Structures are given as C-alpha cells and as structure tokens.
Amino acid sequence: MKSPKQLRKLWRQHHEAYQGCMHELAEREHCYPPPNRPPFPEELRGLTCGAKTRAGTPCKRRDLYLSGRCRLHGGLSTGPKGK
Ligand SMILES: [Zn+2]
C-alpha cells in the first residue's frame, strides 16, 4: 500500500506520460498508429484530493488535476505559495 504522497507522485507521473503521449499524437497530426497511451494505474483509482478543508476534514473530491489536488485545492486559485 502506497502512502498518499507516493500515490500523488504516481498520479503526476501518469499524467505527464499521458500528456506527452497526447502531445506526440498532435505533432504527428493524428496519423496512425497512435502512440500507446499509458494505462491508468489501478492503484490511483479512488484517489481523492485529500487536502484539508475549512471544516478540518480531508477533501474527498476525485476530479483531480495534475497536481493530484482538486479544482478547489490544487487548481488555479490555491492562494499564496511558498517559493
Ligand atoms: Zn480538494
């Protein structure tokens, strides 16, 4: 069993691989055969955002972005970030 941190890393890796694949497809002007899309890792099924909500409970949203967080917690408005 992987820790949420490891799963999030895996999530990111998967999406980067997937996007790289889509990019390659676009560059080839969608000629066939299409590149192999990386399969969705089974262990990422059911991965939730997990960010702490204002109520103090972990966020259970599954519509996650590349960051492995949902729109509310990892989307465009995450607030100030430490650089
Ligand atoms: Zn969230």
Image: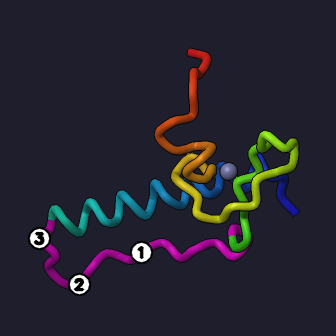
Amino acid tagged 3: Glu
Please state, as top left, top right, bottom left or bottom right, where the N terminus lies in the image. bottom right
The secondary element bearing badge 3 is classed as loop
Disc 1: CA contacts within 10 A as few (<14), some (14-19) or many (>=20): some
**Residue 64, image x and y in percent?**
58, 58
- For residue 29, the mark is 3
Amino acid tagged 1: Arg
- Extreme-front residue of the structure: 55
| Residue on which disc 1 sits | 37
**Residue 70, image x and y in percent?**
60, 53
Looking at the image, tell me whether mark 1 or mark 3 is earlier in sequence order.
3
Vertical placement of residue 7 versus 41, above or below: above
Which residue shows up at 47% across the image and 40% down it?
A: 76
Which residue shows up at 70% across the image and 54% down it?
A: 49
**Residue 42, image x and y in percent?**
69, 76
| Residue on which disc 2 sits | 33
In magenta, the rendered stretch is 28-44
The secondary element bearing badge 1 is classed as loop
